Image (tube, rainbow, N blue to C red):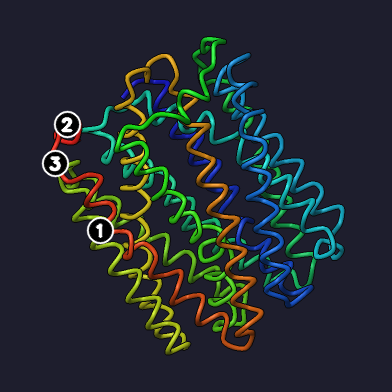
Amino acid sequence: MLPNARRFLILMLLQAFAVGLSNIFVNLYIWNIDRSLLTQAHYSLSQSAAILLSFPLCSLHARRTSPMASSRVGLVLFMLAYAVILWLQEDCARHVGLIGGLLGLAVSFFVIGQHMQFLENAHDAQRDRFLYAANYMTSGAAIVAPLLAGWLIRHIAGPRGYSVVFGLSLLTFAVAAWWSTRISGQPLGRASNLLGAWRNKQRTWRGMFWVSTAMATVQGTYTSFLVTIMAYAILQDELAFGAYSAMVALVGLVSSIALALWSQARHRLRTYTLGALLLCAASVALALVQEPAMLVVYGIASAIGMNTITTCEMAWSYAAIESAPDYAQHKLDYIVVREIPLGLGRMVGVGLFVLLNSQFESQVLSLGFVLFGAVYLALVPALRRIWQPTGPILQKT
């Protein structure tokens, strides 16, 4: 592995630790102030809208500097977002649009460099293993961080515990921003062709465009706040929740090691289908039996399932981008256009959840778990049509 790639993995480790400390605990902090799922939906919607609207600006900055310089801006924006949270404290619930917007903007700038590194450090045939290796590197942070955060919140009672956790996140993002200066950024050409990327009619690219839209509906609700609120509603304790999150991350770590050794591009559809089955079954089970023991079962199954689902989806998306004839000159344009279905899908997911809440408010958590947890499995036929090896492009993947 090249030195630049190793430095990038360390950056991902630092960023994962900072996110693991606070990301899910921001949801809990807001939930403890204002116990409203609609507030959680507003928070998620503001993040999704900020990501969708700011990505073209982020790509422009990346072209004028470098993708890694944009990631550095993202880390600084993460620091600013957590500084605002520390400043607002218990007024956060009234300003979820501001907090979500800042965090969404931070994500937009950061992932520009992340996507470019994933594209440039591995080709399609080896990308599954590289992505699982990145998961392996970041899972250690994801094990320690929520456990530490939960312990601090319990032992420093009240809002002060949350403030300490958010302050540690801010400090870790600062260290990550400093470390990012050691990673060289490759300048890109100034010429952009976003319209050409948008109009690309290749089956793999266009197919993944719509599949990503559907997958993003799950990200906008299920993974952004429903899982967190469901787990906390069952456990009713931040330390127990941190321990649960650490267990899920440990399962993710072990599964990443196994999958990195076993995975091959030709097994992608089979791997994805297994993960989707696990996640769907676990979601239905937890919706029916909301007990700590079932939460543990769900945590194990969902950790393996989401690991395979997200890795396969990313690998397919990168493969679709690489199949474009103008990939070498305009790969950043494809990354930017890829965010359109993701942003729209997240916002549609939040809208569907709000509609569901208006009709079934008392059962919305369980119903949301079942419906959104089944989306990935429902997409298997579409993915089979896109990636079944029947053409010369598909045979390469």
Residue 337 shown left or right of residue 34 in the figure: left
Mark before the other along the chain sequence, 1 or 2: 1
Eyeballing the image, is 261 above or below 161?
A: above
- Using the image as rendered, state which of residue 122 and residue 387 is in the foreground: 387
The residue under the point 70% across, 59% down is 43
Label 2: state its secondary structure: helix
Quadrant position of the C terminus in the picture: top left
Horizontal and vertical percent position of residue 317: 36, 39
The residue under the point 57% across, 58% down is 348
Amino acid on which the number 2 mark rests in the picture: Lys
Q: Using the image, tell me which numbered label, if any, was put on residue 396.
A: 2
Give the residue pinned by disc 3.
389
The residues bearing labels 3 and 2 have C-alpha atoms spaced at a distance of 8 Å
Amino acid on which the number 3 mark rests in the picture: Pro
Horizontal and vertical percent position of residue 217: 51, 59
Amino acid on which the number 1 mark rests in the picture: Pro
**Image marks 3 and 1: residues in contact by CB distance under 8 Å:** no
Give the residue pinned by disc 1.
381
Horizontal and vertical percent position of residue 266: 15, 43
